[in-house]
């Protein structure tokens, strides 16, 4: 199993499907997995610490699991068949590890909530991994991604970028949100 991190989540050109990119350290390959809008939103919201007045489904599952003394300790994307990925959740309760089948999108949404590591089988990365340009694959230096042209002219402040990021997420413009996130990271690191 190869450890991977979430590089990006973006809307496809079809406009109704999202793709999450998973990339491991020291590996040129990136694994794209198609996920639904609700799962993309759930992962994105958790990654960037946005909250809703009421819990989303994955937040509810986390609360229930914790209430019963369990936690997600890792996620493995284990196989692909007919262009469908399969995953397993590993839940620890009372010192016992329980393995459960899951859709990768749900498993990843829970992994980010529990800060659990995500792994991909080498065979899957070999079969479905792709090599992307550096600016898409996470191989660029941190904070080097460009912000959208409209923001460049304004000499943005951290507060204005955060406001634009919140609006982009609310409007479900995840590609814009990812660029704004990168701009916030760049601005934060330069201060």
Image (cartoon, grey):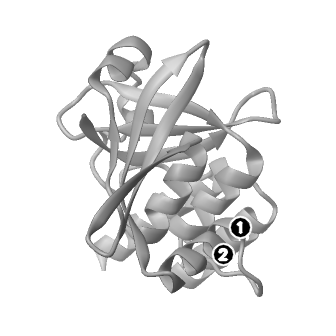
Rendering quarter of residue 153? bottom right
> Is the residue 177 above or below the residue 70 in the image?
above
Q: Residue 185, image x and y in percent?
A: 40, 67
User: Which image quarter is the N terminus in?
Assistant: top left
Nearest the camera: 9 or 144?
Answer: 9
Q: Residue 119, image x and y in percent?
A: 32, 42
Residue that label 2 marks: 60
Residue that label 1 marks: 57
Q: Residue at x 43, y 81 (%)?
A: 69
Are discs 2 and 1 less than 8 Å apart at CB? Answer: yes
Q: Which residue is drawn at 58% across and 80% down?
A: 63
Q: Residue at x 71, y 67 (%)?
A: 57
* Label 1 element class: helix
Q: Is residue 121 left or right of residue 179?
A: left
How packed mark 2 is, by other alpha carbons closer than 10 Å (few <14, some 14-19, many 20 or more), is few
Distance (Cα) linking label 2 and label 1? 5 Å
Q: Is residue 147 visible?
A: no
Nearest the camera: 165 or 118?
Answer: 118
Q: Which residue is drawn at 38% across and 29% down?
A: 30
Nearest the camera: 169 or 19?
Answer: 19
Q: Residue 86, image x and y in percent?
A: 52, 32
Figure label count:
2
Q: Which circle marks residue 76 in the picture?
A: none
User: Which image quarter is the C terminus in?
Assistant: bottom left
Q: In this view, does 171 lie to the left or right of 61?
A: right
> Is the residue 144 above or below the residue 68 in the image?
above
Q: Can residue 160 be seen in this view?
A: yes
């Amino acid at each position: 199993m190869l450890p991977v991190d979430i590089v990006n989540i973006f809307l496809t050109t079809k406009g109704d499907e999202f793709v999450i990119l998973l990339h491991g350290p020291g590996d040129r390959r990136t694994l794209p997995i198609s996920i639904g809008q609700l799962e993309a939103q759930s992962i994105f919201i958790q990654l960037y610490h946005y909250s809703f007045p009421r819990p989303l489904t994955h937040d509810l599952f986390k609360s229930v699991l914790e209430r019963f003394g369990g936690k997600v300790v890792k996620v493995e994307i284990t196989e692909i068949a007919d262009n469908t990925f399969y995953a397993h959740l590993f839940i620890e309760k009372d010192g016992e590890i329980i393995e459960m089948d899951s859709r990768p999108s749900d498993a990843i949404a829970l992994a980010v909530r529990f800060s659990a590591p995500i792994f991909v089988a080498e065979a899957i990365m070999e079969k479905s991994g792709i090599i992307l340009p550096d600016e898409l694959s996470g191989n660029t230096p941190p904070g080097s991604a460009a912000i959208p042209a409209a923001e460049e002219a304004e000499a943005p402040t951290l507060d204005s970028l955060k406001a634009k990021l919140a609006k982009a997420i609310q409007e479900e413009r995840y590609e814009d949100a990812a660029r704004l996130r990168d701009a916030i990271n760049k601005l934060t690191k330069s201060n």
